[in-house]
Amino acid sequence: MPVSSKAQAGELHLQFQLGDDRYALPAQEVVEVLPLRRLKQVPEAPAWVAGVFEHRGRVTPVIDLSRRVLGRPAQPRSSTRVVLVRFDPQLGERSPVLGLILEQATDTLRLPAEAFKASGLEASQPGYLGPLQRDARGMIQRIEVGGLLDDEMRALLFQTPAQG
């Protein structure tokens, strides 16, 4: 069976910026891209938890990835978006949805899976920083959505209703 030109070009990713660096999210994990919006705060959550909002009848938690990674809030630009992702891609459509505030999240690109390489610094990096690859514009690093929250933060943000 012949390989399509799209498959040869690579998997589709949403590209965004953290500071001066480029990052990518696999498009298959993206549910929806929304404009920046007002969020309800989550008391006693870390500063990088931007809040929650109701979307399609569900309360959706949102984290500010810039604050999580760089220690500063995302700039409220016209290209700053709330990107809804499946937090656990293994669950497919049943996965909880997490919102990410991302700067310059307006472009997609195709990146060949085999071109992603380990950085060699994995032991000292957080679990959400995935492999890297180089293209004509420089380095781009994949974000691993499943590594963004530890068990305690998952429990805080994805509470299940109390059973009574």
Image: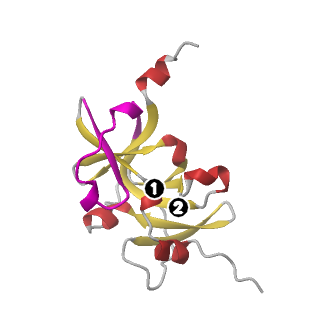
Disc 2 marks a residue whose amino acid type is Leu
- The residue mark sitting in front, 1 or 2, is 1
Residue at the extreme top of the image, as rendered:
2
Q: Are marks 1 and 2 in contact (CB under 8 Å)?
A: yes
Can the viewer see residue 111 in this picture? no
Q: Position of residue 138 (x, y in %)?
A: 22, 36
Q: Label 1, on which residue?
A: 145
Q: Name the residue that disc number 2 marks.
A: 98
In terms of depth relative to the viewer, which is nearer, 141 or 45? 141
Specify the segment rendered in magenta: 107-135
Can you tell which quarter of the image residue 8 is in? Answer: top left
Categorize mark 2 by other alpha carbons within 10 Å: few (<14), some (14-19), many (20+): many
Residue at image location 46% in from the left, 43% down from the top = 26
Q: Amino acid at mark 1?
A: Val
Question: Which quadrant is the N terminus positioned in?
Answer: top right
Q: Position of residue 116 (x, y in %)?
A: 33, 37
Crowd band around label 1 with a 10 angstrom C-alpha radius: few (<14), some (14–19), many (20+): many
**Above or below 133: residue 47:** below
Q: Is disc 1 placed on a helix, strand or loop?
A: helix
For residue 4, side relative to residue 91 (left or right): left
Q: Is residue 139 left or right of residue 29?
A: left
> Does any portion of residue 163 appear in the rendered image?
yes
- Residue drawn at (49%, 72%) of the image: 151
Determine the residue positioned at 54% across, 76% down: 155
List the single residue furthest toward the right: 164
